[in-house]
Image (cartoon, rainbow, N blue to C red):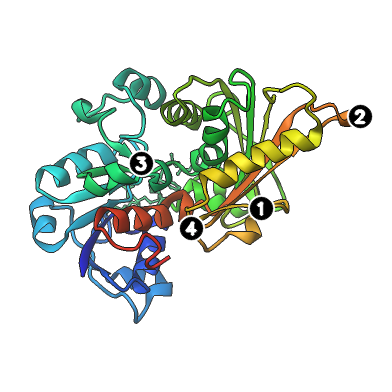
């Protein structure tokens, strides 16, 4: 059995990892840490685990964790995570970091967007991005994996293959995303109170969300071309799920029609993800209801155009923020790191 430590186990992503591990045939939870709730059973913090996962919460002690676990899932906020990741990796534990602390390719880019000095700068740009669909071989060998951001997953998966194939223009990509409230985590905040979110949808962080640079950075790395994206996130009154609607201009060929562009882009996505069990290029319009509580991604393409003259490409992609956007992806990464079926437990 793969022994798993959960760091920051009182949050939402940690609960989702614990829930998924209950059904995993080759991995088990052996350690759960908390700063504030040391000594309590994990099931007291997450009552849905009662009678199924009652291990006692421990303080964060990398040397002790190294004795008890093969891999640590670090479910801490960005800024706070990097130091724990460094200490765990130094103690010999393989780490999957849920935060953004090792996702970007350079220290200046990280410090510009996260506003803190990185405690392990030599590893920034030197940690594999945990998207097995593109980086599986590196993940299999990695000591540290940077689990992808939730919004970036929904944007990178459809956009990167189309940019790589030269099928959409790179300078005018608009990403409009809606997230369930669990995306903001379990720590109480004014903006996620029931009366602030119920029966309401709101945009936030216009032209300034830290996931914009993550999307640009990763599409560049995967596609080999720089892109310019304009990203707007919205908070929606659902527990979980992300729907991203993306707009781009197609690179046209002679005599293109709406139908020919649509088919070419759908075929490219289908070819890219032919052997990827979690990624589905579908004919219908994806909805969060089609993917929540699963690690699956659904995407499709439409093309606008009066009189059959192709206008904008419109891409719709749905994921579960807590699953393929966080904990499901982490289990998939763990499976790849330990050489077992990537779908196990998912
Ligand atoms: N929610 C989502 O959909 C997604 C989240 N992520 C990322 O995953 C990570 C965890 O997210 P999520 O579970 O939602 O967050 P939560 O706020 O639900 O939980 C985070 C946990 O981290 C611990 N913690 C909080 N602050 C600190 C600190 N300063 N130092 C050490 N520990 C701290 C707390 O545990 P305690 O107080 O018990 O120590 C807390 O329970 C974050 O980096 C987030 O950005 C990524 C993708 C999607
Ligand atoms: C709805 C909501 O607030 N979502 C969070 C993003 C989710 C998240 O946890 O960010 P990472 O994927 O980078 O870890 C936000 O906008 O900051």
Q: Circle 3 sits on which residue?
A: 135
Mark 1 → mark 4, Cα distance in angstroms: 13 Å
**Residue 220, percent across and down?**
45, 25
Residue 50 screen position, x and y as percent: 37, 78
Whether residue 189 sits left or right of residue 309 in the image: it is left
Residue nearest the observer in this picture, 228 or 138: 138
Disc 3 is placed on an element classified as helix
Residue annotated with mark 1: 282
Sequence-wise, the earlier of marks 1 and 4 is 4
**Quadrant location, the C terminus:** bottom left
Q: Residue at x 9, y 47 (%)?
A: 91
In 3D space, how far apart are the residues under numbered discs 2 and 1 (Cα atoms)? 25 Å
Question: Mark 2, residues whose alpha carbon is within 10 Å: few (<14), some, or many (≥20)?
Answer: few
Residue wearing tag 4: 277
The 10 Å Cα crowd at callout 3, few under 14, some 14 to 19, many 20 or more, is few
CB of mark 2 within 8 Å of CB of mark 4? Answer: no
Q: Quadrant of residue 165?
A: top right
Q: Which mark is residue 307?
A: 2
What element does badge 2 sit on?
helix
């Amino acid at each position: 059995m793969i022994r798993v430590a959960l760091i920051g186990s009182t949050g939402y992503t940690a609960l989702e990892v614990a829930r998924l591990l209950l059904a995993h045939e080759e991995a088990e939870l052996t350690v759960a840490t908390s700063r504030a709730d040391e000594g309590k059973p994990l099931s007291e913090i997450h009552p849905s685990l009662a009678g199924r996962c009652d291990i006692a919460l421990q303080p964060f002690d990398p040397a002790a964790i190294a004795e008890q676990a093969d891999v640590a899932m670090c479910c801490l906020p960005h800024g706070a995570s990097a130091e724990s990741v460094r200490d765990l990796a130094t103690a010999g534990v393989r780490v999957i970091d849920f935060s953004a602390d090792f996702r970007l390719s350079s220290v200046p880019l990280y410090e510009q967007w996260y506003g803190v000095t990185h405690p392990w700068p030599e590893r920034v740009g030197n940690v594999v991005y945990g998207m097995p669909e593109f980086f599986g071989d590196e993940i299999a060998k990695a000591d540290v994996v940077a689990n992808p951001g939730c919004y970036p997953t929904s944007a990178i998966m459809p956009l990167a293959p189309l940019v790589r194939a030269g099928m959409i223009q790179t300078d005018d990509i608009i990403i409009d995303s809606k997230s369930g409230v669990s995306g903001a985590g379990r720590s109480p905040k004014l903006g996620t109170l029931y009366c602030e979110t119920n029966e309401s949808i709101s945009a936030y962080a216009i032209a300034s969300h830290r996931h914009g640079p993550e999307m640009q950075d990763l599409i560049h790395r995967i596609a080999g071309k720089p892109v310019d994206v304009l990203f707007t996130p919205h908070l929606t009154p659902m527990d979980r799920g992300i729907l991203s609607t993306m707009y781009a201009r197609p690179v046209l060929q002679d005599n293109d029609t709406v139908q020919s562009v649509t088919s070419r882009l759908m075929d490219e996505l289908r070819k890219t993800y032919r052997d990827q069990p979690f990624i589905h290029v579908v004919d219908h319009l994806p909805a969060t209801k089609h993917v929540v509580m699963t690690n699956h991604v659904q995407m499709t393409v439409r093309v606008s155009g009066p009189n059959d003259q192709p206008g904008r490409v419109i891409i719709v992609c749905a994921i579960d923020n807590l699953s393929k956007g966080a904990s499901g992806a982490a289990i998939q990464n763990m499976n790849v790191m330990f050489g077992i079926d990537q779908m196990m437990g998912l």
